Image (spheres, grey):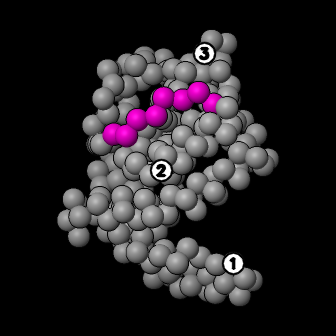
Amino acid sequence: MRTEVKEKSMDAYWAERARSYSGMNRAQLYSDRKAAWEAVIFSHVDESCPLKVLDIGTGPGFFAILAALRGHTVTAVDMNGKMLCHAQENAAAAGADIGFMQVGHILPFAKESFDLILSRDVTWTLTEPEKQLESWAQLLRPDGKMLYFDAEWYFHLKNKESYDKWQKIKKRIEKAGIVFYPKGGELEEIAADLPNDL
């Protein structure tokens, strides 16, 4: 699948999935996961003064909301317009003041603009993750920090032993009554040849 086609397919998938994904993230804001994420993220920075924070690939706005509620100045960007609509709704419901912006691969910010860059579950979706991470790093101030959280979510598509193991686990999950997102197979097709092995 060509890069442009992959990116359009990925965007279409997440546009359709935006509502359910937002619901999952919103539930975390009102659970013990909120405090767990805050401890993981903010133990790495000095919060004695408000920070200028950039949340890249904000999706439903989870990280952006966490940072804004702690008094930081937050800009949150995403390529997907529907995700941003849900992020704005979630931020309003949480009482978080955030500047949201729809962007492409090139981020419209000056070098050394931010104290903290956050990103969650984004790098695996990128066709050129190393190049993107390098460009993100240029946006950090000299003493700034970048924290990104991700995994090789689709390793099982490249490894037969892992694939077989996943199929068994999936059957147990389904047997327990948990329903997988119906179009998850579409995302697997897109992810199969992404360079998601950073």
**Which amino acid type is marked by label 1?**
Ile
Relative to 66, does residue 158 appear above or below in the rendering?
below
User: Is 136 placed left or right of 38 in the picture?
Assistant: left
Q: Pinpoint residue 193: horizontal percent, then vertical percent.
A: 31, 69
Residue 149 in view in this figure = no
Amino acid at dot 2? Met
- The residue that disc 2 covers is 83
Residue shown at 46%/34% (left/top)? 100
Check residue 145 for magenta coloring: no
Quarter location, residue 140: top left
Between disc 2 and disc 1, the foreground one is: 2
> Residue 6: x, y in percent?
28, 63
> Which of the numbered marks, if any, corresponds to residue 178?
1
The range drawn in magenta is 96-103
How far is the residue under mark 1 from the one under mark 3?
Answer: 41 Å
Horizontal side of residue 83 vs 195, given as left or right = right
Q: Are marks 2 and 3 in contact (CB under 8 Å)?
A: no
The secondary element bearing badge 2 is classed as helix
Task: Give residue 168's mark.
Answer: none
Location of mark 3 (residue): 50
- In the rendering, at what x and y percent does residue 13 appear? 41, 65
